[in-house]
Every structure is written in structure tokens, then in C-alpha cells.
Image (cartoon, rainbow, N blue to C red):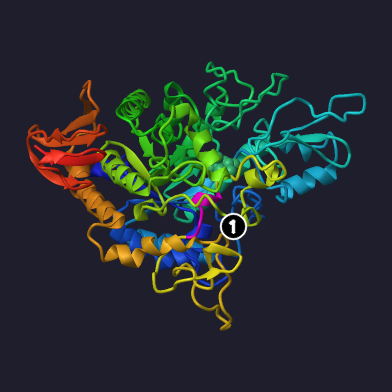
């Protein structure tokens, strides 16, 4: 007996491996130093050979790039620097022809301040229906000179900005990202139109930005604990926080579910909701989005206890939602995991702070042990890919890329860095967004102003010249010279590379695990540092055992035949920081 393939077809996303493309840093086809949609089309054979099921595109919409494209000016169009709607359609067709699905990013919490609605709101003045689409309030103080409350922006500074006529508007993120008012029915209608628009243009699913933040009820409670790690963890969990994870947000997703179900197969969505694991199921339920990101891996340190807890909680959340869970180690907002696992491991709640501190000091405050980081990243991906549910891979992790902590301040793009530059307290997220290295033949030369960054070549990210024959611009973020050891062309020819490991593991996952293994999991309770789980074959006999050794001493392999290991065994035993897949 095999897993029912009809169900697999409709529910393809329930066990999918989704590859996140951060479009401006993936592949540049026209030499302007920014990745683009034709660049993605060029690399479809690469994505196919990697063995993924779907591509999630971070925003590619017209944007002033105040927040890497998460400040959207037009939700139903393509940024001209990235291509045209024609390119989008060609890309969707080419992905589908290659058997890959397409997920697009929807940003419903805020628009760009250059969005026509916001321009209208400014022109129309206080009390107008134009202002109702956003959250405008009068200020406090005798002359309204103080913001309406003390909320802070997640990117630093107050969450309120004053406009010329004296009113203030709310922006939980950058000031260029005014928050929408989801009490206005026009906002609901327009987003439904956007969901249909992209579904009609070939989107198979959606990633919902800040999914837990849309519903708001303003009050005077100070919200100063708004570090993304703390969000949802320090606030009340009864659905009454003024800002996050409110009960009403679920009404919006029930509406969207009706739109998703107009399509065959129904569209699905995955919510970016930084909420406690016990609340994830609400977003993921079949009557709402379908899936939600489970960030517990991304937050966990490299040890058996925290990883085991992340797995247990992820599986419980899935049970409760009636959906499958998701596993994430890296994305465009988090320091790359190969670096995290090579830094000293502190209490999980501090890791974000530790990594940010490390980045702030240009990577010099602690020793980043790259050999260790790589070894653990290899063990981690095998552990992750053996789990039931969906796995979200962030571009470049398959190359084993590390964070680039020493980007020069004057080249940073992240609003976090810009807002804190005066005080220089956070460099932000650009270090994981550096354009990918494709080709070792296109070596940059070290630039006089920064010995460790290149100028001239771009490791094949951009073509040598633009269409008019002039040299291409430098990549929008500088690539470090050490990227030369991580280029795709080198890794393709090296059986021991990270890329080779991803390809082998992904092939086994789609040919064997996804077809034959049941979606349940049996996590062994053990007292030592070995994390072991089993998945039974649906035929009733045999299955997979996945063992990861987090301890220092080698441990014996359980019975069965080893089908893949993240590193060499030691006298037949599993050495430290190594995962093996065993078929029994
Ligand atoms: C999400 C995105 C992040 C963005 C923020 C505001 O957290 O992942 O990149 O800055 O939302 O849109």
C-alpha cells in the first residue's frame, strides 16, 4: 500500500520542500546589480536539480525598497527593475512545466507610504474616508505634539509618525510602512482581489507576512517588548493583546479560505505568525490558512533538548490544527544557521541577541567556528528533512553559506540599520541577503576600500555586461571574497559539498519518504544527547530511523541499513554533530 497520490496532488504543500527566493539577491539577468524574474527563470534547472517542490518568492512588487520590498506600492504588479507581468507569467509557466509550484508573498499589515491609498489619505485630510484605510490618530499633549501612545517600531524609534496637518499614523515597522486598518471593508475587498489576481496568474499558494498582526485595538498599554523573538511570548496569549494574535485576525483568514477554495486545487497559505506554539494551530487550520511557520527550530540552540522540544511542539501543533507543521532554520530575517551553530551556544532566548551582537561587531566579538557550523548545518538538514511536514529552505543554505557580518555600514539596506545607525545598535538583516555566488570563474578583485569585499566580478550573480555592452553594476550588497569557496559550479562537481548533500537528501525524501512513510512520528525519550525518531512505512513493515548525535562521544547505530549520513562514521559509530538515516 502506498500513500494515496490523489490526496498528495491536492495537498501537495503538506509535505513539500519549499525554497525561498529573495528575488533581488538570487540572480541578476540584466546587469543592474539586482536579481530579477528572468534571472529566476534562468535558474529553474538548478532548482529542479536541487529536488525541491515549490518556490516561495519574497516580494517582487513595485517598491521604494525601504524594507527590502516589504513596502509595497502596487500589490498587483511587478517592480520594473525585476521584470514585467509578462516575465511573471513566463516564470510561472516555466516553473509549472518543471513540476514546481509557486508561492507568492502577500504583505497585508502595511503598504508603502508611496501606495496610492496612502497618498490619497494624506491629501484627503483628517476625518476623511481616505484616512480610514490606515490608523491615524490625534496626538497627546496640549498641541497634539506627543504620539498617541508609547508604542515602539520593531525597527527602532516610535511607532508613530506625524503628518503635515498634525495627525499621527501608526507604523509598527518602518515609517515608510503605514499600518492598514483592517476594520475598513475596502481593505478586505482589495486583498481578496489581490489573492485572486495572483491565483489567476499561476500562484499555487501564498506566504502571509506578519499574519498575526493585522487586527489591532489601540490602547495605552506600552508595548516596548517588541523584539521579534519576544513578540507573542511576553504578551498575553488570550487573544486580547492590542496588537498581536488577536481573535479577530482569524475572521480575515476564514474569508480568505473562501477565496482559496474557489480554485482547483484549492490554494493554500502559510502564515508568518510569531506566536506561541499553542496558538499556531489556529492559523494553520483547514478553515484558515492551511499552514503556519513554526519558528521553534530557528530559535533553538544546537542541543538535543531544545531541538527535541521544537520537534515535539511542532508535531503537537500539527495534530491540533489538522494540518502539517513546517520546519525552518533560516530565512531572510534571521542570521544564517551555519553561522549560528558555529557561535557559542547560549540560552535560546538570547541567541538572537548574541548573533546580533556578533554582527554588530563585524563578526569579531566571538569566534565563529566554521568547521563546526558546517558540520552541524549538515547534521541539521538531515534531521529536518526526515521530519513529516513541510521544510522551508532559504536560498544559499544549500551552499552552506555563512552570515556576512562585516558589511560596511554605508552599504547596508535594512531599515533596522538605518534607524539605529546614529546609535549603531543593530546592523540588521543584510548579512543573510547578500547575492548568491554562482560561478567561481567570475572572481571579483578585492576593492581598495575594503580588502575583504570584491569589486568587478560578482561570482556569476550578474552578467559581465549590460545589454548595451557597458560593464554590469556591482551587486546591490557587496559579496565577500570568501564566497569563492561556496560557488555553485564548484559544489556541483564535489560529492562532499553541502549542495551534494542537499541533493541526495532531497531525492531520498521525494522518492522514498514522501511516498512511503506515514505522517506520524515516534520521538524516542532518551536521557543522553542523541535525538532519535522513527517513522513507520505505511505498508506496516519497516521505515526510517533518524539519529542525530549532539553529544561528544560516538554512539552506536540502530539496526538497519544506513542510507545517508551527514558525515563519516567513526569505527561504525555516529560521531558528534552527525545525523544518519537508517532504513529498517
Ligand atoms: C516580515 C518580513 C520582514 C519584514 C517585515 C515587515 O517579518 O519577513 O522581512 O521586514 O515583515 O514587512
The answer to whether residue 23 is seen in the rendering is yes
Q: Residue at x 35, y 53 (%)?
A: 398
Residue 147: horizontal and vertical position, in percent?
80, 29
Whether the magenta-drawn stretch holds residue 485 is answered as no
Residue closest to the far right:
142
Residue in front for this viewpoint, 134 or 260: 134
Helix, strand or loop for disc 1: loop
As drawn, 9 above or below 320: below
Residue 472: horizontal and vertical position, in percent?
56, 74
As drawn, 401 above or below 536: below
Ligand 1 positioned in quadrant: top right
Q: Quadrant of the N terminus?
A: top left
Give the residues drawn in magenta, as a range: 430-435
The image quadrant that residue 78 belongs to is bottom right
As drawn, 274 above or below 341: above
Q: Which residue is mark 1?
A: 77
Q: Is residue 85 left or right of residue 119?
A: left
Residue 208: horizontal and vertical position, in percent?
51, 40
Q: Quadrant of the C terminus?
A: top left
Q: Residue at x 55, y 61 (%)?
A: 478
Amino acid at each position: 500500500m502506498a500513500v494515496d497520490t490523489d490526496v498528495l496532488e491536492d495537498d501537495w504543500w503538506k509535505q513539500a520542500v519549499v525554497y525561498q527566493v529573495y528575488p533581488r539577491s538570487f540572480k541578476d539577468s540584466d546587469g543592474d546589480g539586482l536579481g530579477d524574474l528572468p534571472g529566476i527563470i534562468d535558474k529553474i534547472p538548478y532548482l529542479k536539480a536541487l529536488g525541491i517542490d515549490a518556490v516561495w518568492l519574497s516580494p517582487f512588487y513595485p517598491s521604494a525598497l525601504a524594507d527590502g520590498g516589504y513596502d509595497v506600492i502596487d500589490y498587483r504588479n511587478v517592480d520594473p527593475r525585476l521584470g514585467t507581468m509578462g516575465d511573471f507569467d513566463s516564470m510561472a509557466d516555466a516553473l509549472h512545466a518543471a513540476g514546481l509550484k509557486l508561492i507568492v508573498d502577500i504583505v497585508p499589515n502595511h503598504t508603502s507610504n508611496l501606495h496610492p491609498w496612502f497618498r490619497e489619505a494624506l491629501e484627503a485630510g483628517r476625518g476623511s474616508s481616505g484616512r480610514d484605510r490606515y490608523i491615524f490618530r490625534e496626538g497627546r499633549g496640549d498641541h497634539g505634539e506627543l504620539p498617541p501612545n508609547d508604542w515602539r517600531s520593531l525597527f527602532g524609534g516610535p511607532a508613530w509618525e506625524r503628518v503635515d496637518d498634525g495627525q499621527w499614523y501608526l507604523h509598527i515597522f518602518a515609517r515608510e510602512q503605514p499600518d492598514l486598518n483592517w476594520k475598513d471593508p475596502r481593505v478586505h475587498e482589495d486583498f481578496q482581489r489581490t489573492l485572486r489576481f495572483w491565483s489567476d496568474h499561476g500562484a499555487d499558494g501564498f506566504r502571509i507576512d506578519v499574519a498575526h498582526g493585522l487586527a489591532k485595538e489601540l490602547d495605552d498599554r506600552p508595548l516596548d517588548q517588541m523584539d521579534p523573538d519576544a513578540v507573542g511570548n511576553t504578551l498575553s496569549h488570550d487573544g486580547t493583546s492590542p496588537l498581536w494574535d488577536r481573535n479577530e485576525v482569524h475572521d480575515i483568514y476564514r474569508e480568505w479560505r473562501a477565496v482559496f477554495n474557489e480554485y482547483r486545487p484549492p490554494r493554500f497559505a502559510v502564515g508568518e505568525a510569531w506566536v506561541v506554539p499553542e496558538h499556531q494551530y489556529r492559523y494553520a487550520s483547514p478553515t484558515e490558512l492551511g499552514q503556519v511557520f513554526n519558528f521553534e527550530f530557528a530559535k533553538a540552540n544546537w542541543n538535543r533538548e531544545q531541538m527535541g522540544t521544537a520537534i515535539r511542539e511542532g508535531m503537537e501543533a500539527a495534530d491540533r490544527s489538522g494540518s502539517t507543521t513546517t520546519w525552518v532554520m533560516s530565512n531572510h530575517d534571521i542570521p544564517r544557521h551555519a553561522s549560528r551553530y558555529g557561535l557559542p551556544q547560549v540560552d535560546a532566548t538570547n541567541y538572537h541577541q548574541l548573533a546580533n551582537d556578533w554582527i554588530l561587531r563585524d563578526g569579531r566579538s566571538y569566534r565563529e567556528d566554521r568547521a563546526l557550523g558546517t558540520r552541524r548545518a549538515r547534521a541539521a538538514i538531515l534531521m529536518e528533512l526526515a521530519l513529516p511536514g513541510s521544510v522551508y529552505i532559504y536560498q544559499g543554505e544549500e551552499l552552506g553559506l555563512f552570515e556576512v557580518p562585516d558589511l560596511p555600514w554605508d552599504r547596508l539596506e535594512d531599515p533596522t540599520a538605518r534607524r539605529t545607525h546614529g546609535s549603531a545598535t543593530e546592523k540588521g538583516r543584510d548579512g543573510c541577503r547578500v547575492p548568491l555566488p554562482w560561478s567561481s570563474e567570475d572572481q571579483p578583485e578585492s576593492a581598495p576600500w575594503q580588502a575583504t569585499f570584491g569589486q568587478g566580478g560578482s561570482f556569476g550573480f550578474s552578467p559581465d555586461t549590460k545589454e548595451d555592452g557597458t560593464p554590469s553594476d556591482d551587486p546591490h550588497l557587496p559579496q565577500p571574497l570568501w564566497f569563492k569557496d561556496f560557488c555553485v559550479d564548484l559544489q556541483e562537481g564535489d560529492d562532499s559539498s553541502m549542495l551534494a548533500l542537499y541533493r541526495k537528501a532531497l531525492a531520498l525524501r521525494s522518492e522514498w519518504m514522501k511516498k512511503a512513510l506515514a505522517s506520524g512520528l515516534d520521538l524516542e525519550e532518551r536521557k543522553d544527547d542523541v535525538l532519535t525518531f522513527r517513522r513507520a512505512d505505511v505498508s506496516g513493515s519497516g521505515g526510517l530511523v533518524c539519529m542525530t548525535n549532539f553529544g561528544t562521544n560516538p554512539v552506536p547505530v540502530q539496526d538497519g541499513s544506513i542510507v545517508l549520513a551527514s558525515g563519516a562514521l567513526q569505527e561504525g559509530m555516529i560521531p558528534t554533530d552527525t545525523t544518519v538515516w537508517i532504513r529498517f
